[in-house]
Amino acid sequence: MPLDIAANIQINGPVEGRAVEILTPEALAFVADLHRRFDARRRELLAARTARQARFDAGELPDFPPETAALRAADWTVAPIPADLQDRRVEITGPVDRKMIINALNCGAKVFMADFEDATSPTWTNILDGQVNLKDRWAGDLTHVDPKSGKRYALGANPAVLKIRPRGWHLPEQHMEVDGQPVSGALFDFGLYFFHNARATLAQGSGPYFYLPKLESRLEARLWNEVFVRAQEALGLPVGTIKATVLIETIPAAFEMDEILYELRDHMAGLNCGRWDYIFSFIKRLGRRAEFLTPDRSAMVMGKAFLGAYSLKLIQTCHRRGAFAMGGMAAQIPIKGDEAANQAAFAKVRADKEREAGAGHDGTWVAHPDLVPVALEVFDRLMPTPNQLDKRLTDLTITQAQMLELHQGGRTEAGVRENIRVGVRYTQAWIEGRGAVPLYNLMEDAATAEICRTQLWQWIRLGADLADGRQMNSQLFVSLLTEEMADLRRDFPSPRLEDAALLFSRMVLSDTLEEFLTLPAYELIA
């Protein structure tokens, strides 16, 4: 069906420089068409999340849906997966700035996920520059000269396979309105990239590949599938041209992995263990209840309790259906000037990747190019084949109780302080325009800040006992925040630090647990 080169489209931000190559009338009409067809359903599904939260608060627990038991029992597989996605043993992720994209594509990883979501602060400039950079990748014109050093960066001879992560269903793009309504950030990011690059990716032996974040149900996956079908139809491409990997990073989605694979079966490339957002989701969805009072963030490690159960369930589910099961992120970054600490950090990464490869994952994520050789060595040694689809875990049974088992561990003042420090500092960086932020020897994105603020909210709300005998309450939080702010003001002085602290503390002290930190934070940058 032809696109309507539409009226009633409004751009509320400047269109300067090369942005005109992205925001063409035809591309905007393409996004507007997706908005008009699918935005009402998107809003319904977001409302369904709120309704389900009320049921969780009333005592319901996440579980495998009885109404889809027959689908889970049936034998079916996803559509064939393209050749360049058969070996994904190490994937690197990062924001969409030009130098980062070039370095990530050149670093030796099999796949680079260019992230418009948790690793990018969605300023208008960041979003449009990212689209320009990705368009240049497929046009063969991706180069960069560092203005300070004069060093030139260019794409190498064997770049990583490129995947794109658009924003989640919840985030708006306030700078584009259709019929008086802001469009979804997800449709904006997906639509512009797909419209400008789908044919070019195919012409160069790859394809339009995506990562889909923060889904909470099979119905949200179904909506993405409908978007994909329409997008391919509009550009005259066959159904199944798009391939997507879904991040299982919410507790409700973990109980619908079969169903999500099925809804996207024509477009499915695999599932990924989004471990940090998964912890955030666990607290957000269940954390109003005392039986789910979490320990220090550092105690919630992969391989144990609910994280260990869901990663094994993901491997089992994916491999039964012919889809790839991707492991989680290693967020460590090199520690300069302290070789012993650096080697200890790398040893942690190595052990984590050995657990993943040994369990049956087909690949893993890293956040820094220096970790690519570490992860590659592990997967090359433990996974000599391109993937581990033959590792079916058929004797494994994962129950609802195992999927909800809480990690053991205490709650400490140090844990409170770390949550305050990381949460405020990351929020400051985000509203200043940076989404991937090195903090205390880890590369942090929005998921970590979300854990920090929801865990503090939970501990105050439930009056959690700390290891030293004190009870966590708003007064103690304010006291520790005041002390931590003194150091943050010394190290990161900025008016935006004060904005970040005000927003972060307001959300921690609120009577209600807000869905996302990034929604009110977006109002500070949009």
Image (tube, rainbow, N blue to C red):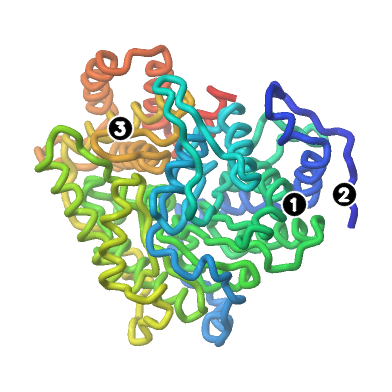
Of the image marks 2 and 3, the number of the one nearer the N terminus: 2
Q: Could you tell me which residue is drawn at 68 percent across and 23 percent down? A: 17
Q: Which residue is mark 3?
A: 422
Quadrant of residue 7 within the rendered picture: top right
Which is more toward the observer, 8 or 419?
8
Q: Is residue 310 above or below residue 490?
A: below
Near mark 3 (Cα within 10 A), the count class, few <14, some 14-19 or many ≥20, is some
Q: Give the alpha-carbon distance from disc 2 to disc 3, as whole Å.
A: 46 Å
Any mark on residue 38, and which?
1
Secondary structure type for disc 2: loop
x, y percent for residue 344 = 14, 48
Which of labels 2 and 3 is toward the front? 2
Q: To which residue does mark 2 refer?
A: 3
Q: Percent from the top left, x then y, of residue 253?
A: 49, 62
Q: Earlier in the sequence, mark 2 or mark 1?
A: 2
Q: Amino acid at mark 1?
A: Phe
Check disc 3 and report its element: helix, strand or loop.
helix
Would residue 269 appear left or right of 183 to someone viewing this image? left
- Label 2, label 1: how far apart the Cα atoms are: 15 Å
Amino acid on which disc 3 is placed: Val
**Quadrant location of the C terminus?**
top right
